[in-house]
Image: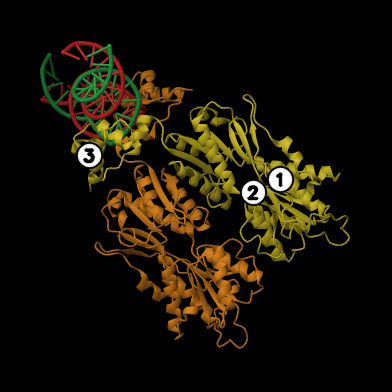
Chain colours: A orange, B yellow, C red, D green
Amino acid sequence: MPERVTLRDVARIAAVSAKTVSRVVNGDAHVTPSTRARVQQAIADLGFQPNLVARSLRVGRTDVVGLVVESLADPFFARLTSAVEQAAHERGLAVMVSSVGNRAPERESVIVESLLVRQVAGLIVAPMAQNSAYLAGAGRRTPIVFVDRLPEGIVSDAVLVDDLAAGEMATRHLLDHGHRRIAFLGSELRNPTTRLRLAGYRRALAARGLPDDGSLVAVGAGSAREAGAAAEELLAGSRPPTAIFSSNMRCSLGLVPLLHGRGRTDVAVVSFDDFPMADSLVPAVTVIDHDPEVIGRAAAERLFRRLEDLDAPAQTVLVPFRLVPRGSGELPPPAGHVQTRHQAQDRRFEQDREQDMVHHAGEGRASTMTSPHAQEGAR
Amino acid sequence: MPERVTLRDVARIAAVSAKTVSRVVNGDAHVTPSTRARVQQAIADLGFQPNLVARSLRVGRTDVVGLVVESLADPFFARLTSAVEQAAHERGLAVMVSSVGNRAPERESVIVESLLVRQVAGLIVAPMAQNSAYLAGAGRRTPIVFVDRLPEGIVSDAVLVDDLAAGEMATRHLLDHGHRRIAFLGSELRNPTTRLRLAGYRRALAARGLPDDGSLVAVGAGSAREAGAAAEELLAGSRPPTAIFSSNMRCSLGLVPLLHGRGRTDVAVVSFDDFPMADSLVPAVTVIDHDPEVIGRAAAERLFRRLEDLDAPAQTVLVPFRLVPRGSGELPPPAGHVQTRHQAQDRRFEQDREQDMVHHAGEGRASTMTSPHAQEGAR
DNA sequence: CGGTTGCTTGACATCGATGACAACGCGGTT
DNA sequence: AACCGCGTTGTCATCGATGTCAAGCAACCG
């Protein structure tokens, strides 16, 4: 077992003090070229590598950022993680990831604490817990950026897509293609994301004066399988929907195979979240695309800036989304259901919301961006 | 900014020494119930949380494992990461991930070193570099488990699928369905995985006395797009293949959409690596399925055992794979090409290799498992 | 009742690096 | 020649926890 090489070993070989070695290692200018060379030679000879744990203890902070997501097996979070990792790496920071698992939102606080005791410099959290107030204390020491979901009970930096506007756009897209019975398929309602997308769905219906038919709203599916079952039930109803807005990827991964399996590819579908192969199916699946890489990078950048200025007011960053028409969302309702037909058929992207939006949240109140931005979607 | 609470603060409040607080925190039995209670009270009052960085410095090792993969955006590695993270979490270990990116295998050593200086307790590495000998020195201090690819130039623990046997099985499957002109689609040949799968392909052909036609081997595609282009070229040849063995997911994600786009779904396809939606396409895609979760967990378990016994001989663990027939791999060659037709049509899994194989590598030589196991696949 | 055992508890050094501050050497000034 | 200033280098303490070892104390024994 080779011995560990420390600063002092190098110092001894180079016949200088440990402090001087430290200076060389850290690129301090106050070292004469000759000593510097001697030290560097000794470092090379011994293969010295500084112990970042010791440095972290001394300087009181690590160069590690913590990332808490629901599941790394979920492609959305995987790509988000990938982007965070890349951005961090560019700044010389490492990333510790922890996944909460969709079973137990209450595990979130345990996971977060396990990162905090490891003295991470900052945290990026995709909150599962209904209320993130428990993080308020921690957030005073360790900056936290929330992603994907707006945290409740805490004012902090956040990076989000405008779920309400996106939900509204998806629904309006189906309305524009003549559908009047549009179902909403979603996961747990305790998830704020689902709630906002549902609110967008309802807003779009209301804008056309359509009733909000509770029998068309199927929420609670925790897995793709359950989502498929929920969809099956919807279609088996007495007045089945002619179109379905699937409000997240998990739902879509349940819904789409079901439709194909049952030969019901006549049902129009818009999926929130793009997914692999969505464009190879027949018909290809129309999606709301929001790029997890963009979200991840934005969150990382936000965190970096926060690390440089701990006292700036909290900011909420909204990242762009767009609707990608591919076929499934442009299917007409069956004859007898058709009522009107709008344009927007051949445009590659119905709307590309190139918002570079940055909102400044007030000191004292939670930042909110639901109302102002949901409006813009109107086309 | 709230002050940092340390052991000594707790000690002062509880009127004991720092050491005693340390004992309570670490569950040391040699503390009387009454002092223990007093200390616990003080800990609770102050909200003390131990500083793991300081502890790590003192005990000389962190409770973090490092994971190096090609790309977290790749679902295979994402799921592998997820499994590693879960297994680690169960042991109270954190995970630092770093992705190398497929552009620059030479970055691998930089990434590995950035984890080593952070004093990770162990490493799990999916090697990109052609030669991993540079890790030999590091591996003496920090245990390393290689996954997915057999490292070259170093003897170490490894967790792998038997790529050669799997490549052979995929090819034989196509042969069994009457194909005689079978193409091989793969990424860079410097990747040992690709090389082994190609070797399996050739072995299967040779076993039937078929020539190894170089014009049917398309390798080098670095992206899905390139794989699609390569496939297009194959099909445009004068004697095009009637079947294609796509040797990894990236290739499949290029190949399959291309075939659908060109209306060439008559070409038989077996894909190495399952991918989302593979079973919803028409025809559904026959795949060699090897579970990244199983690999990840196996690698983590291997690492844990290694951490407990640093001197045991290196082990190579082979994880099971299976061929999942779904349609695309069972397509017959077009009339005039048909020669024979075998059975094995309706069995759900052609073979489920429930190997729980553990190989013990000799001390002095690289562990190899290519020859013994490739044989078993014969059916 | 002295000595021994056994348990609880504390003093101190230590892990490896770095911040604060001082000493030192050298050249230039008056 | 004594002094000053400046840049290089070293000494020492420190970050927060834990291993070592010994002191302190009670019970128990002969």
Marks 2 and 3 sit apart, C-alpha to C-alpha, by 54 Å
SS at circle 3: helix
Q: Which residue is mark 1?
A: B166
Lower sequence index among marks 1 and 3: 3
Q: Are marks 2 and 3 on the same chain?
A: yes
The answer to whether the residue labelled 1 contacts the one labelled 3, judged by CB atoms less than 8 Å apart, is no
Q: Are marks 2 and 1 on the same chain?
A: yes
Percent position of residue B124, x then y = 53, 39
- The answer to whether A230 is drawn above or below residue B274 in the figure is below
SS at circle 1: helix
For badge 2, the amino acid type reads His
- Dot label at residue A290: none
The answer to whether residue B143 shows anywhere in this view is no
Q: Is B315 placed left or right of B28 in the picture?
A: right
For badge 1, the amino acid type reads Ala
Marks 1 and 3 sit apart, C-alpha to C-alpha, by 62 Å
Percent position of residue A255, x then y = 58, 68
Camera-nearest residue between B353 and B253: B353
- Residue at the image point whose x is 40% and y is 74% from the top: A374
Q: Which residue is mark 3?
A: B38
Percent position of residue B288, x then y = 69, 51
Marks 2 and 1 sit apart, C-alpha to C-alpha, by 10 Å
Give the chain letter at badge 3. B
Give the chain letter at badge 2. B
For badge 3, the amino acid type reads Arg
Q: Which residue is mark 2?
A: B290
The answer to whether the residue labelled 2 contacts the one labelled 1, judged by CB atoms less than 8 Å apart, is yes
The answer to whether the residue labelled 2 contacts the one labelled 3, judged by CB atoms less than 8 Å apart, is no
Camera-nearest residue between A376 and A159: A159
- Residue at the image point whose x is 37% and y is 25% from the top: A7
